[in-house]
Amino acid sequence: MTDRYFAKVVSARDRYTIVINAGEEKGAKVGDRFLVIGLGETIVDPDTQEELERLEIVRGKASITHVQDKISTLISCEYERSSDVKEIKKVSSKGGGGIVGFLGSQDTVTESIKPGEERLKELTGVQIGDFVIKL
């Protein structure tokens, strides 16, 4: 493992939670943030045929929630939000007495924006042996 990579994923608990092989002994602390990556194919320069690097495939960002001596538990720390919804309500009032009767029927239009829902983003395709890079 190079200096670029802090640790490896040793367990994928669910779509949001992983365990890495670095804990208090390696200086891991609750709140530390990481980029979780898998290694893909080796990229080759088409002109020189030189092997450049292995492609890093981003799985997501996660932060440490629990530290033990040799392992740490991380949970996704990114959120995604669904689209806002625009609601338009039109209310008609028919004539009658008072000012409404004098002016005829009146329409009232109310517009409101309902914010989208925010939810925790999944760590995509995490596998045992993937790496984490400290942010």
Image (cartoon, grey):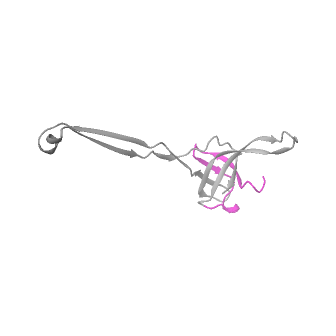
Q: In which quadrant will I find the C terminus?
A: bottom right
Q: Nearer the viewer, residue 96 or 42?
A: 96
Residue drawn where x is 80% and y is 41% of the image: 42
Residue 72 location, quadrant: bottom right
Q: From which residue to which does the magenta span run?
A: 1-29
Q: Position of residue 37 (x, y in %)?
A: 69, 47
Q: Position of residue 58 (x, y in %)?
A: 67, 45
Q: Nearer the viewer, residue 15 or 92?
A: 92
Left or right of residue 84, residue 37 in this image: right
Residue 27 highlighted magenta (yes or no): yes
Residue 123 highlighted magenta (yes or no): no
Q: Position of residue 70 (x, y in %)?
A: 68, 57
Left or right of residue 6, residue 123 in this image: left
Vertical relation: 110 (above or below) 71: above
Residue drawn where x is 34% and y is 40% of the image: 88
Q: Which residue, as the protein is rendered here, is positioned at the far left?
A: 97
Residue 113 location, quadrant: top left
Q: Which residue, as the protein is rendered here, is positioned at the far front?
A: 103
